[in-house]
Amino acid sequence: MSQYSIKSLAEYFDVYRKSVSDPERFWAEIAEEHFEWHRLWDRVLYWDPVKPEVRWYDGARLNITENCLDRHLRRRKDQAAIIFEPNDPDSPAVTITYGELYERVNAFANVLKSQGVGKGDRVCIYLPMIPELAVAVLACARIGAIHSVVFAGFSSQALASRIADADCKLVITADGSYRGAKTIDLKRIVDVALESCRGVERVLVVKRVGTEIEMKQGRDLWLAPLLAEAPKTCEPEVMDAEDPLFILYTSGSTGKPKGMVHTCAGYMVYTAYTFKNIFAYRDGDVYWCTADIGWITGHSYIVYGPLLNGATTVMFEGVPSYPDYGRFWQIIEKHRVNQFYTAPTAIRALARQDLSYVTRYDLSSLKVIGTVGEPINEEAWHWYNEHIGQKRCPIVDTWWQTETGGIMISPIPYVTPTIPTFATLPFIGIRPALMDAEGRELEGHQVEGRLCIKFPWPSMARTIWGDHQRYKDTYFSTFPGMYFTGDGALRDAAGYYRITGRVDDVIIVSGHNLGTAPIENAINAHPAVAESAIVGFPHDVKGNALYGFVVLKGDASDADPDVLRREINGLIADSVGPIAKLDKIQFATGLPKTRSGKIMRRILRKIAAGDMDDFGDVSTLLNPDVVEELKQNAV
Ligand code: 7RM
């Protein structure tokens, strides 16, 4: 029992050792004790790193929603499963108990069945952060349909390509969505998307904003009347352990998005176990992750991980700046939130506001605060620690990916001593490796290299939908036999990991392979620099030359740009080498970022190349306005 909830550093090391010395035994024990199965597995792990093929709990049969819902009805029928906090702070929050969630999921599952959806069919969910989103996800899982949630900030083009790639037969959407002071016509975006892809027989529409919309005869149906008629129980489809549970597209920075496929049993076991430990969730706590369910963080740590543990999970429809920059802190006070999980980009934006937005609220309920999505810088870490965690709450800097399904490297709060900007230690069962450019593993401490994982874990993505070769090429070919993350990391003297950023943006300058990450680190070491991004641009002699976009700290904006340019190149020459000096440096007020905080290098590359038209899909940018400024000031 104790290994399910780790309470001390000694226990962590002990359980970790067990999990890597006999992984099959370890993961069998966790799975058998903490989940309900229709049939146990014949074999815990099958692993062929060449194909590559991985199967966990092969032969087992289960339905993940029975583990999220049915089994909690005995003890938690009237406990809140979801607390829905709407965009409008004056609208009441809505509490959905486990009993109510059970009925809503079952009714929705029956609606899907009545519309001809069955096991293995793909359903696209394009909804704002309203309860129907979580219900729709679980309803699919109830009947064995494969959900493909598309973040409702994506454009119709992006939506269409995802619907087509997965060959979805049904789309679930809403008339519109609220985002701060704005209303977005979601249904219209779906209509445009469906003009360019066939196969979708039915669109189910949630009424959220009440605007007048077009309903296409024979294709579109309002959801509410169907739900009202549907029976409130639906027998779960009993799934094989390795049947797909969902497809989720990664924000591919280049080319076609990759539909990562996650399967039922391993994903269930790993997300539940990580949630329990990494958020130190205890009965009665209120947990809030600010991500959107359209991203993997929302799948694993708003819906599945929390509900598998019988937790109370907050779903927030709005944005951190509406009606003002105090909204997050107001919600924490209002719902007495105990665990809070957000992204560094949100922390940095909020840290720039007047501190009174924070201090006017009571944050004493917080016990654990977390970050995810990108490396957190020292300044943001300290602000978060001091003003939000009030130096009482451990910060869990959680490193993981869409592909990994669950958190891979992270402190366990109140167990692992934290160091700013370090994701610290691998979670139970995870075996990281740092590799050099020649494919040798870097052993020991104080080393930096490419981050790989050298043994399978239960929630790893099994394939890319429809393209297993691409899965193999992308993740298992750079370092044969291992999963390559695309990130760089260092391991310090204590064995702690710090993620340094993507390493797959390699630029070849005069025949030298240069990674962007070490050059950016050198630039960022300048006291006047807030952040930076470098890209390559075509050069007659060198093949490629380097172009740097540099954001200065607020108090450095009147420094002499030529002096800064010289100093920045001096730092690069010192830490990487003169070959890595930048040919061009453009100062900017910001970098184009996705909502999860990732720099869209694709846009920067075009600007650096002087190619100012057709920026493709920028609908997921947090700050689309910055693109115009970057174009104007290109050097
Ligand atoms: C969960 C998620 C994955 C990429 C990953 C990293 C970066 C995520 C951290 C981080 C440093 C972290 N999935 N990343 N977490 N970098 N520290 N704690 O974000 O598929 O959307 O992105 O995000 O580069 O490879 S994701």
Image (tube, helix red, strand yellow):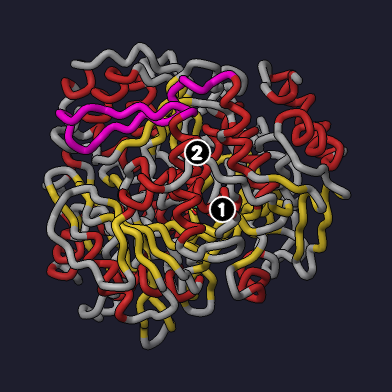
- The residue depicted at 60 percent of the width and 64 percent of the height is 120
Q: Provide the secondary structure element on which disc 1 rests.
A: strand
Q: Would you call the spot at circle 1 few (<14 residues within 10 Å), some (14-19), or many (20 or more)?
A: many
- The residue depicted at 77 percent of the width and 56 percent of the height is 55
Answer above or below: position of 201 versus 339.
below
Q: Is residue 7 left or right of residue 324?
A: right
Q: Is residue 383 magenta?
A: no
Query: Which labelled disc corresponds to residue 488?
Result: 1
Q: Is mark 1 in CB contact (under 8 Å) with mark 2? A: no
Query: Which labelled disc corresponds to residue 301?
Result: 2
**Quarter of the image with the N terminus in it:** top right
Q: Provide the secondary structure element on which disc 2 rests.
A: helix
Residue 76 location (% of width, % of height): 53, 21
Total numbered circles? 2
- The residue depicted at 78 percent of the width and 38 percent of the height is 27
Disc nearest the viewer among 1 and 2: 2
Quadrant position of residue 436 = bottom right
Whichever of labels 1 and 2 marks the residue nearer the N terminus, that label is: 2
Q: Nearer the viewer, residue 508 or 434?
A: 434
